[in-house]
């Protein structure tokens, strides 16, 4: 495990709690995310196919590493019911070192 591997917070939204729960469990079980926080009560306003839409959603905060980021995004896209799911990754600049190391340990590929 490399402590130099950056930590990312990946944002996505889901249409409901059931979808968010399925996605969160899959990402953690597959070792792509150390933790997924579900925030219910989000409300999104967006333009889609030429119209302004508004929908209730569940925001997911997915904690992963740079080494696992592409695979995590691919898995979100594969599991997600939306045609174009939100996938926005933000690299962390700082954090509790022990927590960042825990994220790295939980998302380490088996061959490491």
Image (spheres, helix red, strand yellow):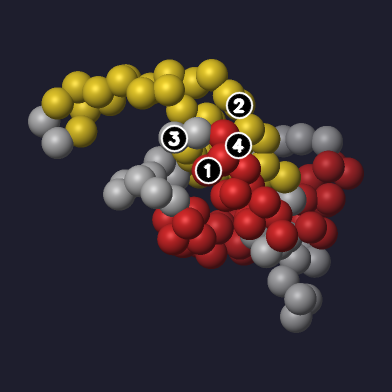
Q: What element carries label 1?
A: helix
Residue at x-position 75% and y-position 66%: 108
Tell me the crowding category of disc 4: few under 14, some 14 to 19, or many 20 or more residues within 10 angstroms, Cα based: many
Alpha carbon of mark 4 to alpha carbon of mark 1: how far?
14 Å
Tag 2 near tag 4, CB within 8 Å: yes
Residue 15 tag number: 3
Tag 1 near tag 3, CB within 8 Å: yes
Alpha carbon of mark 1 to alpha carbon of mark 3: how far?
7 Å
Q: Mark 4 points at which residue?
A: 61
Q: Mark 2 points at which residue?
A: 39
Mark 4 or 1, which is nearer the eye?
1
Q: Mark 2 vs mark 4: which is more N-terminal?
A: 2
Residue at x-position 83% and y-position 51%: 101
Residue 19 tag number: 1
* Residue 78 placement, left or right of 90: left
106 or 91: nearer the viewer: 106
* Residue 44 placement, left or right of 89: left
- Which of the 4 quarters of the picture holds residue 56? top left
Q: For the N terminus, which image quadrant?
A: bottom right
Tag 3 near tag 2, CB within 8 Å: no
Residue 88: give x, y in percent of width and height: 45, 41
Alpha carbon of mark 2 to alpha carbon of mark 4: how far?
8 Å
Q: Is mark 4 on a helix, strand or loop?
A: strand
């Amino acid at each position: 495990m490399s402590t130099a591997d950056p930590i990312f917070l990946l944002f996505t939204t889901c249409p409901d709690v059931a979808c968010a729960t399925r996605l969160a469990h899959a990402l953690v079980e597959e070792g792509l995310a150390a933790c997924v926080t579900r925030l219910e009560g989000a409300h999104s306003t967006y333009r889609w196919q030429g119209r302004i839409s508004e929908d209730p959603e569940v925001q997911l905060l997915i904690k992963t590493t740079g080494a696992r980021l592409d695979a995590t995004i691919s898995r979100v896209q594969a599991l997600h019911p939306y045609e174009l799911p939100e996938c926005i990754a933000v690299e962390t600049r700082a954090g509790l070192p022990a927590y960042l190391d825990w994220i790295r340990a939980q998302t380490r590929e088996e061959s490491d």
